[in-house]
Amino acid sequence: MESPLLGLILDSSVIIAAERKRQTVEDLLTSIGQTFGEIEIAISAVTLAELVHGVVRANTPEIRIARRAFIDELKKHVPVHPVTDSTAEIAGQIGGEQAAKGITLPADGLLIGASAIEQGCAVATLNTRHFQKIPGLQVLSL
């Protein structure tokens, strides 16, 4: 029996998909609430870095401004969990164990997954492939 979730850590894929569909942050959070019920929602600092990367890489000033506004609104409603020394320890342990088995985990996904494990949360993502390789992490697909 799985333990009850303390919350959800959103992967950037979920946030990017919402922004591309021109959803508001409120729309995104409402949709997640309808799917999973009342639950704490957060993002990892690594996810924030991925989102800002997308702002910088935008092809037009309009897209850049829209992405930045979406991130700013998201941060008003969703806490950002830092990468702590505990997060790094969890990531190093899992990454090393998986590497010993010949399984390579992308560093960003590993850190996001470690952050979720540290917080007792699941990861909500549209990209389950990488996250499912992290032992002990509950992965929920949206």
Image (cartoon, rainbow, N blue to C red):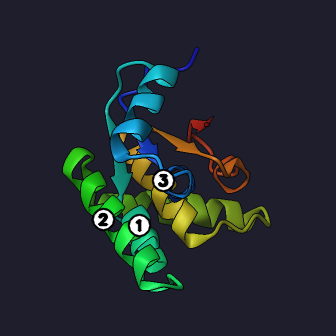
Q: Quadrant of residue 69?
A: bottom left
Please name the amino acid that badge 3 sits on: Ile
Q: Residue 50: x and y, percent?
A: 46, 71
In the rendered view, would you say 69 is above or below 10? below
Quick one: label 3 or label 2, which is nearer the N terminus?
Answer: 3
Percent position (x, y) of residue 103?
76, 64
Q: Kindly identify which residue carries mark 3.
A: 15
Compared across the picture, whether 48 is left or right of 94 comes to left
Height in image: 96 above or below 137? below
Q: Amino acid at mark 2?
A: Ala
Disc 1 and disc 3 in contact, CB within 8 angstroms: no
Q: CA distance from mark 2 to mark 1?
A: 18 Å
Q: Which tag is nearer the camera, tag 2 or tag 1?
A: 2
Q: Which residue is mark 2?
A: 69
Q: Residue at x 43, y 40 (%)?
A: 28
Instruction: Identify the residue under disc 1.
Output: 46
